[in-house]
Image: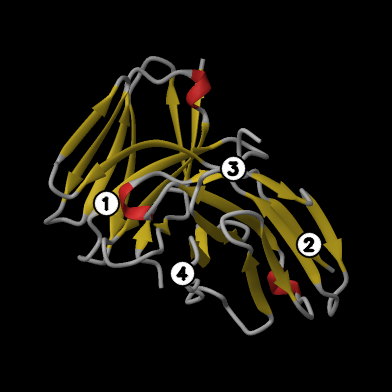
């Protein structure tokens, strides 16, 4: 597609359930990022994928969070045993290369509500 | 830790006037700075950037100023238009780091 695509756009789940969020980056973009935005806060870095290199997972808040990416295509962010504090908009972004030399292209986000 | 700070959560200006959005950062390793604009229910979109080797970058109605000694940057929009009403995020990154740090955003409202 022309832009970064994320699904689902909205997800409401019960505390303790697992959720899976999907990101389809712009074709040809080697770098892929996951961010989350809690209410009233900025964008919080979660994880970064660059080509076939080992991902930078330094932003993942706990071991309940994990992400995968197959090659330079789709990425999945998984949150296990969701907690209410996981409620946020999860944003995926892709870029042609390193973040310090180019802009990020964001998807519309997946809004997660944990009841 | 909040390495990028936007201390004004909101700003309201009259159409045709100048909008000035401010951003402060604490990490002296940051060397690339960007502004993103976000409309409701959409992802942020890139607006303008500046490298630390410059102190000003201009693109049409948008100008970003960087004051490295003060660790401060600002976005000027002139003249402001109602379509500029959005949330503006300041972001910063370092050459030796993969992640880009974002501020909390400033909601700009331009009144007709």
Point out the tag, 2 or 4, that comes first from the N-terminus: 4
Of all residues, the one furthest to the bottom in this rendering is A63
Q: Secondary structure at mark 1?
A: strand
What's the distance in space between the residues labelled 2 and 4, CA to CA? 32 Å
Q: At 31% across and 36% down in the image, what residue appears?
A: B75
Please tell me whether mark 4 or mark 1 is closer to you in this view: 4
Q: At 40% across and 67% down in the image, what residue appears?
A: B2
Quarter of the image with the N terminus of chain B in it: bottom left
For label 4, the crowd category at 10 Å Cα-Cα, with few meaning under 14, some 14 to 19 and many 20 or more, is few
Is residue B24 found left or right of B81 in the rendered image? Answer: left
Query: Is there a contact, CB below 8 Å, between mark 3 and mark 4?
Result: no
What's the distance in space between the residues labelled 3 and 4, CA to CA? 26 Å
B81 vs B112, nearest the viewer: B81
Is residue A20 found left or right of B54 in the rendered image? Answer: right
Q: Secondary structure at mark 2?
A: strand
For disc 1, the marked residue is B32
For disc 4, the marked residue is A53
What's the distance in space between the residues labelled 3 and 1, CA to CA? 21 Å
For disc 3, the marked residue is B43
Q: Which mark is drawn over residue B64?
A: none
What's the distance in space between the residues labelled 3 and 2, CA to CA? 18 Å
What's the distance in space between the residues labelled 2 and 1, CA to CA? 33 Å
Point out the tag, 3 or 1, that comes first from the N-terminus: 1
What's the distance in space between the residues labelled 4 and 1, CA to CA? 23 Å
B28 vs A60, nearest the viewer: A60
Is residue B39 found left or right of B13 in the rendered image? Answer: right
For label 2, the crowd category at 10 Å Cα-Cα, with few meaning under 14, some 14 to 19 and many 20 or more, is some
Instruction: Give coordinates of residue A111: x percent, y percent.
Output: 73, 54
Please tell me whether mark 2 or mark 4 is closer to you in this view: 4
Q: Which mark is drawn over residue A113?
A: 2
């Amino acid at each position: 597609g022309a832009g970064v695509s994320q699904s689902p756009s909205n997800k409401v789940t019960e505390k303790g359930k697992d959720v899976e969020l999907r990101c389809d980056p712009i074709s040809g973009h080697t770098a892929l990022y996951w961010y989350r935005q809690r209410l009233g806060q900025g964008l919080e870095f979660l994880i970064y994928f660059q080509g076939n290199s080992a991902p930078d997972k330094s932003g993942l808040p706990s071991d309940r969070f994990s992400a995968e990416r197959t090659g330079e295509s789709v990425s999945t962010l998984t949150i296990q045993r969701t907690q209410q504090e996981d409620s946020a908009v999860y944003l995926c972004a892709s870029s042609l290369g390193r973040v310090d030399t180019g802009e990020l292209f964001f998807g519309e986000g997946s809004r997660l509500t944990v009841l | 830790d909040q390495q990028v700070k936007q201390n004004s959560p909101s700003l309201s200006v009259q159409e045709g006037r100048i909008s000035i959005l401010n951003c402060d950062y604490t990490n002296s390793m940051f060397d690339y700075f960007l502004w993103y604009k976000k409309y409701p229910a959409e992802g942020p979109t890139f607006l303008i950037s500046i490298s630390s080797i410059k102190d000003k970058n201009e693109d049409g109605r948008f100008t970003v100023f960087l004051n490295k000694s003060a660790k401060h940057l600002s976005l000027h929009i002139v003249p402001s238009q109602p379509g500029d009403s959005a949330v503006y995020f300041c972001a910063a990154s370092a050459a030796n780091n993969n992640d880009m740090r974002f501020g909390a955003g400033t909601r700009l409202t331009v009144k007709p």
